[in-house]
Amino acid sequence: VSTALFQTFYAQMMSSASTACHRSDLESRQHFYGDEPWFSNTAILHALRTTCAAAHAEQRIWVGSPAEEIRRVFPGGGRILGAGAILRLGGSQHMGFGESDVGYAYRQLSRVVHPDKNPEEQDASAAFQRLIEAAEELRQALSDARATVRLLSESLCISAPLAEELERPQMKLFAEATRVLSAVLAATGEGTVPSSVGIRALSAFVSSSAYGRCDAIRILTAWFDQPQLVDLFSTATIRAAYDCSPKRFRLQFLCTLHRVMLAEAKRNNGCVRQNVQAVTKLYPEMDSWQFLRQQLQVKVSAVD
């Protein structure tokens, strides 16, 4: 079985599984994954924003004793805790955060680690300073995320994001990143298809509301011939948005990214550009996905 046929088989299999996802989740709590244009589904995006807001409203930050928090924020020995870990923000538990969440977490922790309240703790000043830096890092990360959302939206010529979508911008950013990858894949095609089929596919792509009626040549040129769009995907900004997203969307992102890499290799005689390699290094989970794909290919190609 050729790679193209395998890809077609697997895409059909995963699409069928995705169709049955809701029923199976309710009946057996099993999860199925596949191509899902969730990034253009306003109901899904609204539900994700609502869930994120509810998570922050219901679950307040846990704070330990002053000594525990000082050692956690400033572990010493050259070790530096990440900003999100310090303020206990980020990750898929909350699916994002905004300035109000940063401010709340900072206030709760600053009351505990402030050096004026802990004169007996020699690392209190350093911990308090690190807390200030962490809060500023997260505020800057929010600015970077909003700027990246706008750049990705511009690459597809879709409307600018709404204010409520950028309050906690991580899910909107991840949606647009997934939309860009999916658009590149849809515009370039997979496997080998007759020219007549390719023409119909391009017509369907241009008329699809999922991609904002983006011009196929524009998005393919931006991805394959220019570095700026690809370079956005190698930033910590999109990686942080990835980490905040639900599992099934992360898996779809990895699958789509891998398929875009295959498309690039096909265009370049088996090679991918250095900046594309930088993107894959940011997602070590790709190794597991590639292993799974290889095992599936062996299984599908095996002769009974």
Image (cartoon, helix red, strand yellow):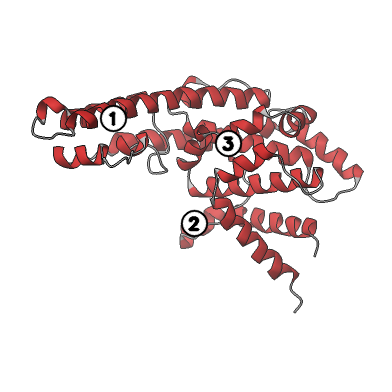
Residue topped by disc 1: 130
Q: Quadrant of the C terminus?
A: bottom right
Precedes in sequence: disc 2 or disc 1: 2
Q: Residues within 10 Å of mark 1 (few under 14, many from 20)?
A: many
Precedes in sequence: disc 3 or disc 2: 2
Q: CA distance from mark 3 to mark 1?
A: 26 Å
Residue topped by disc 2: 25
Q: Nearer the viewer, mark 3 or mark 2?
A: 3
Residue 224 lies in quadrant = top right
Q: Position of residue 168 (x, y in %)?
A: 43, 28
| Residue 65 seen from this side | no
**In the displayed structure, does residue 248 sit left or right of residue 10?**
left
Disc number at residue 234? 3
Disc number at residue 94? none
The vertical placement of 18 against 165, above or below, is below
Residue at horizontal 68 percent and vertical 28 percent from the top: 212
Residue at horizontal 69 percent and vertical 48 percent from the top: 259
**In the displayed structure, does residue 79 sit left or right of residue 220?**
left
Residue type, label 2 = Asp
Residue 281 lies in quadrant = top right
Q: Quadrant of the N terminus?
A: bottom right
